[in-house]
C-alpha cells in the first residue's frame, strides 16, 4: 500500500500501530445510532444537535468540557426497562452509574426504584423525593451511621455483604425497634466475560459471601435467627459491561439451588431474587448490546425454569440496570486545544478535559468513539488518539479513533456513551474543575449539576 493511500491518511506511515486492526469508517461524518443518544443528529450546516440544540450553542452557553444528557432518551430507556419487566418484577436503577436529584425525579416519575451504595447516594435519593421503601442500600463496608440512617429512613432493602454486617444491621434495627428487610449478597463462582476490575461473582474479590464451602448457607442461618432482620431474598451480581447471558444462566441455577437448600433446611421459601445488573452498552460500533425486552424474557425464563425444576414457587425478580439506562444518553463535549502529528504513529489530539472527567480508559482500558461535531469535513481520515490536559502519559480519553485530518484547535469533538461512571468517578486531579451536567429536552437546555469553580476548591482547603 502506498503512503498516500494509507487508511490513516497522509500523516501516517504505511503500517498501523500494533494493536490497531480496524479500517476507518466509510463516512467520518456519520453518527452511529448505536452509540449516540436518540435525539442526536446533524443539522443542515453539519453541526451536531441534541434535543434540537446545536452543540456550538451548548459550548457557548455552558462551556467545555461538559456532559450533555438527553433527558428524552434517559426517560425512554428507563420506561423500556420498566415495561420489559412489568409489574411482577422490580427495576432498581443503579445510582452509582450517575446520580443527581433531577435523575432521581425522572426515575420516580417513570416508576423505577433506585439502589444506592453510600450515605451520599442515599441522601441524594431521599432529598429528591424517592420514597424510602423504593430504595435498596448496597455496599461491602457500610458504616454504622449509614446503616442507622437507612434503617431510620425506612429503606426497602439492605443488601448484606458479610457476616459482620449481618450482626451489625440486626443490632441497629433492633435498637431502633424495627425489623429490616434484607437480602444476602452471594458470590456464585461465575467468571463474567469482562474486565477483571468489574467482574464481581468469582470468589477472589471483595463483594459478597461465597456460595462455595457453605458460607452463604451459614449466612442464611444466622440472618434467619436474628429478630432485627427479615430475610426476603438472595442477591447475585456477576459483573459489568456483559453481553453474554450464559453467565446469568449459571448464576441463576446456583442461586435457585441455594433457595432450594434453604427451603429444605428451614422450611422457608424466600420470595425475592435479585440478579443485579451489568448488562453492556455500545461504546463503539462493534458492540452489540441486547434490548431490555430480550433481557427480561431471558432472565424470566431462566429463573422460572430453574424454580420449576427445584419445585419452588418463582420468586419476584429484581434487576439493577444503571449503565444500560444512563450510559448511552450522554456525551462529553470537548474543545480541541492542540494537535500533534507523529509520523508513523498517529496524531495526538489534546482536549480541554481528560482523565479527570473520564477515568475509565486509564482504569479499565475502556474503548470509546469520538466525532468532530462542530462541522463536517471531507478531509482524509487520520488515526488519532484523543488525550487530556493532565500531567500523565496515561491521560487518554479515546485510545484509537479516526478523525478528519483537517481537525484544528477550536473544533468541538464529542465522545458518546459517557453517561455512566464518567461524572460519578470524576476527580479534581491537577485541581481541574469537574464539568457540569447539562440536560437537554425539547429544544431547551438546563444545568442539573453545575460546573465546579475555583471557589469550590478553595472552600474545602482550610489552610
Image (cartoon, rainbow, N blue to C red):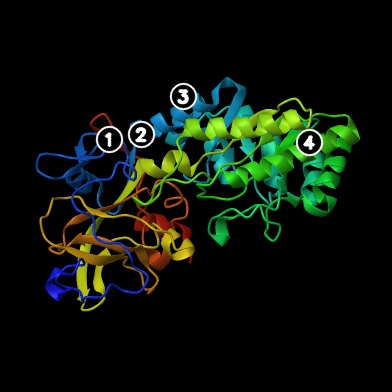
Q: Are marks 4 and 1 in contact (CB under 8 Å)?
A: no
Of residues 431 and 215, the one nearer the viewer is 215
- The residue identified by callout 3 is 109
Quadrant hosting residue 22: bottom left
**Image position, residue 182 (x, y; %):** 74, 36
Quadrant hosting residue 372: bottom left
Disc marking residue 73:
2
Question: Quick one: label 2 or label 3, which is nearer the N terminus?
Answer: 2
Disc marking residue 39:
1
- The residue identified by callout 4 is 259
Which residue shows up at 39% across the image and 29% down it?
Answer: 76
Q: Are marks 3 and 1 in contact (CB under 8 Å)?
A: no
**Image position, residue 225 (x, y; %):** 89, 37
Which residue shows up at 59% across the image and 34% down it?
Answer: 299
Report whether 174 appears left or right of 378: right
Question: Quick one: label 4 or label 2, which is nearer the N terminus?
Answer: 2
Which residue shows up at 13% across the image and 50% down it?
Answer: 375
Decide: few, some or many residues near mark 3? Use Cα within 10 Å; few <14, some 14-19, many ≥20.
Answer: few
Q: Nearer the viewer, mark 2 or mark 3?
A: 2
The quadrant the N terminus occupies is bottom left
> What kind of element bears circle 3?
helix
What is the CA distance from the residue labelled 4 to the residue labelled 2? Answer: 38 Å
Of residues 364 and 448, the one nearer the viewer is 364
What is the CA distance from the residue labelled 3 to the residue labelled 1? Answer: 21 Å
* Count of numbered circles on the image: 4
Question: Quick one: label 4 or label 3, which is nearer the N terminus?
Answer: 3
Q: Nearer the viewer, mark 3 or mark 1?
A: 1
Q: Are marks 1 and 2 in contact (CB under 8 Å)?
A: yes
Amino acid at each position: 500500500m502506498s503512503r498516500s493511500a494509507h487508511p490513516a491518511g497522509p500523516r501516517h506511515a504505511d503500517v498501523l500501530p500494533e494493536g490497531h486492526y480496524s479500517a476507518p469508517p466509510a463516512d467520518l461524518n456519520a453518527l452511529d445510532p448505536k452509540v449516540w443518544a436518540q435525539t442526536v443528529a446533524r443539522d443542515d450546516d453539519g453541526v451536531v444537535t441534541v434535543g434540537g440544540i446545536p452543540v456550538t450553542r451548548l459550548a457557548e452557553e455552558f462551556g467545555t468540557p461538559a456532559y450533555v444528557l438527553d433527558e428524552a432518551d434517559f426517560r425512554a430507556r428507563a420506561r423500556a426497562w420498566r415495561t420489559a419487566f412489568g409489574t411482577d418484577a422490580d427495576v432498581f436503577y443503579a445510582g452509582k452509574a450517575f446520580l443527581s436529584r433531577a435523575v432521581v425525579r425522572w426515575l420516580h416519575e417513570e416508576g423505577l426504584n433506585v439502589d444506592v451504595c453510600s450515605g451520599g447516594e442515599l441522601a441524594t435519593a431521599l432529598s429528591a423525593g424517592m420514597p424510602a421503601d423504593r430504595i435498596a442500600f448496597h455496599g461491602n463496608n457500610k458504616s454504622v451511621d449509614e446503616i442507622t440512617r437507612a434503617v431510620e429512613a425506612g429503606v426497602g432493602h439492605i443488601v448484606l455483604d458479610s457476616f459482620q454486617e449481618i450482626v451489625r444491621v440486626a443490632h441497629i434495627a433492633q435498637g431502633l425497634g424495627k425489623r429490616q428487610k434484607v437480602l444476602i449478597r452471594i458470590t456464585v463462582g461465575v467468571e463474567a466475560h469482562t474486565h477483571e476490575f468489574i467482574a464481581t461473582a468469582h470468589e477472589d474479590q471483595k463483594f459478597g459471601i461465597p456460595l462455595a464451602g457453605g458460607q452463604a448457607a451459614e449466612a442464611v442461618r444466622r440472618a434467619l435467627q436474628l429478630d432485627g432482620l427479615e430475610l426476603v431474598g438472595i442477591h447475585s451480581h456477576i459483573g459489568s459491561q456483559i453481553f453474554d447471558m450464559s453467565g446469568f444462566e449459571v448464576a441463576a441455577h446456583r442461586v435457585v439451588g441455594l433457595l432450594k437448600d434453604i427451603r429444605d433446611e428451614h422450611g422457608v421459601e424466600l420470595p425475592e431474587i435479585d440478579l443485579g445488573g451489568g448488562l453492556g452498552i455500545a461504546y463503539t460500533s462493534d458492540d452489540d448490546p441486547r434490548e431490555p425486552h430480550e433481557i427480561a424474557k431471558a432472565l424470566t425464563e431462566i429463573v422460572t425454569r430453574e424454580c420449576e425444576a427445584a419445585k419452588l414457587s418463582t420468586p419476584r425478580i429484581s434487576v439493577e440496570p444503571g449503565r444500560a439506562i444512563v450510559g448511552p444518553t450522554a456525551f462529553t463535549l470537548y474543545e480541541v486545544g492542540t494537535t500533534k502529528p507523529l509520523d508513523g504513529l498517529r496524531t495526538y489530539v489534546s482536549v480541554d478535559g481528560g482523565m479527570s472527567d473520564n477515568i475509565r480508559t486509564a482504569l479499565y482500558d475502556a474503548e470509546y468513539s469520538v466525532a468532530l461535531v462542530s462541522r463536517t469535513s471531507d478531509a482524509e481520515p487520520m488515526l488519532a488518539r484523543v488525550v487530556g490536559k493532565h500531567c500523565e502519559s496515561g491521560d487518554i480519553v479515546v485510545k484509537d479513533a479516526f478523525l478528519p485530518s483537517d481537525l484544528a484547535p477550536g473544533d468541538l469533538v464529542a465522545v458518546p456513551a459517557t453517561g455512566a461512571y464518567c461524572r460519578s468517578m470524576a476527580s479534581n486531579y491537577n485541581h481541574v474543575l469537574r464539568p457540569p451536567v447539562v440536560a437537554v429536552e425539547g429544544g431547551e437546555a438546563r444545568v442539573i449539576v453545575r460546573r465546579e469553580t475555583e471557589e469550590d476548591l478553595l472552600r474545602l482547603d482550610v489552610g
